[in-house]
Amino acid sequence: MNEAITETVAEPAQTDETVILKVNQVSRRFGGLVAVNNVSFSVQEGEIFGLIGPNGAGKTTLFNVITGLIPASSGNLIYKGENITRRSPHRIASKGIARTFQNIRLFGNLTALENVMIARHVHGRAGILSGVFGLPAARNEERATQQRALELLNLVGLGNRADENARNFAYGDQRRVEIARALALDPTLLLLDEPAAGMNSNEKADLSQFIRELRHRFNLTIVLIEHHVPLVMGLCDRIAVLDFGLLIALGDPAKVQNDPGVIEAYLGAE
Amino acid sequence: MAEFFATYGFLIVSMVLAAVLALSLYVPLMAGQLSLASPGFYALGGYITAVMSTKMLTYDSETFPIPFVLLEMLVAGLACGVLALIVGIPALRLRGIYLALATIAFVEIVRVLALNLEITGGAIGIFGIPQPFNTQIEYLWVAGPLLLITMLFVYRLERIRAGRAFLAIREDELAADAMGIDPTTNKVLAFTMGAILAGVVGALSAHFINTWNARQGTFDASIALLAFVLIGGSRTFLGPVVGGMALTALPEILRTLSGAGSLPAWLGEFMKDGRFIIFGVLLVIGTVFLPHGFIGPNLFSGSRGRKESRPLP
């Protein structure tokens, strides 16, 4: 089945200036399981790029590899022309790649505001002593950090609940706090892992619009993993389909939707 | 009043020092690191004072000059800070209970070294450490400000960029890493700050106790400090302070009560001799019924407005 797919996967040549992230023959093995198998694609600057596939296809693993949480077994990742393959997660984050997590990983015992402020860490410079003594520079920085965090919480509609502990938020609201936290890094590339999970259909429709606004407002490139097919088809400029770790299709929504390999992966062969 | 201070001077200063030591455990815990290394650094700080004051520093005055005490505390803090970096960078690769075990091993190494080295006086230790004060309660002039400054420091730390990075690591190390916070650097930083605190307390304690040997700062102390933090509360800096003070005072209170006369003899005897049993029982009861400790984060939540949820039954 793979022979036929390679041709669909072949992309039109892209100029390197507009490529923000290049995933180059990346594989990740867990013992005998190949979770991501020799996957290559490029994400263009400013696009909304969808990553779909059945459960266990390796989408989240690929996110973890991109953000450095799991090292790639082979292959490499080029972000803005720089090889980030073996970088640690905080280094990758400080270069402008932010993410949310499929199984929400907020700092539960801290307030929503603190959660977002923490992600401003890389943009701060105040050290321990200047902070503890409340020197003017540290104070101003603290005020600016707080203000920025509040703006972002307002943006996701939770500004009035800034002082509540993150774990007291409803599931959908926790996802919003996670998005605000990711945005606090001032990323250029935002990775959203199933942002619509746990939302009702109205919320999903709003989410689509919201993600488009985010791209416009923050000049973002967005890669998102999503199961909800209508959302992905309506929102993404291009889509990559993973199945059992392999990239089986890549292209615009219409092309991917009609791809026989994709239909087979989702519905099974006739 | 003078009589009260004469009787309880030692206890009051011990309580204050215990509170600072408990905070030395709390700071690494802010970054989620259960380190029991404090007694090791405490012992080292004490030996630095003992050696400096008996062998190196000379003075003419009747009492040991207080600037020298401060100098010893500074040297102890620096030495412990450097040692903490050396120990912390490899040790903090370990997580949870394994880190606790490694730090206990460190405490044990310090003890065995102290017992066998010449400079530490071997098993006898170093005695006759000169006194900067005439009475024990006067140590409060140094210990009191030390506690207040430490409390203020930790209070502020929880509210600034550097401290929030610690809290983020405590909450979810992986997520903190993905948000641009370097877990290793921050863990080592928190560990080092705890070590400096413990070393400074040790430096003062050596004068206070007057003699320093390998029985100071051992594994027992690790457990006692852990109890201070667990029973007092590990989610706000007031927990360790209250825990350290209360549990240091407890044996004395029990002894006073046992001598009250109205109690049956066996109970009085038990309260006097069985204080470690009572200590242990309190630790178990405390962790079962008050998992966040006696002082929870909500007690003074006014300024931060935290709302705590109760787990559903």
Image (cartoon, rainbow, N blue to C red):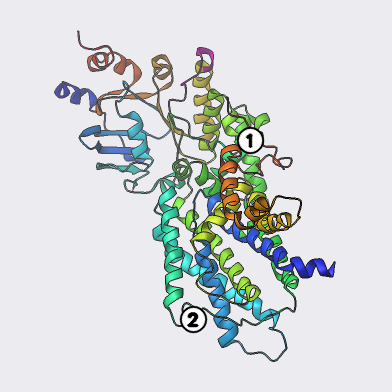
In the picture as drawn, the residue positioned furthest to the top comes out as A270
- Disc 1 crowd rating (10 Å Cα; few below 14, some 14-19, many 20+) is some
Q: Please give the range of residues in magenta.
A: A194-203
Disc 1 is placed on an element classified as helix
Q: Given the image, on which type of amino acid does mark 2 rest?
A: Gly
Q: Quadrant of the C terminus of chain A?
A: top left
Mark nearer the viewer, 1 or 2: 2
Write down the chain letter for disc 1: A
Disc 2 is placed on an element classified as loop
Which disc is residue B121 wearing? 2
| Left or right: B54 in relation to B115 | right
Residue B163 seen in the current view: no
- The structure residue drawn at horizontal position 31% and vertical position 43%, both measured from the top left corner, is A71
| Secondary structure that dominates the magenta span | loop
Q: Is residue A198 magenta?
A: yes
The x, y position of residue B11, in whole percent, is: 70, 64
The x, y position of residue B108, in whole percent, is: 43, 65
Which disc is residue A151 wearing? 1
Write down the chain letter for disc 2: B
| Left or right: B264 in relation to A189 | right
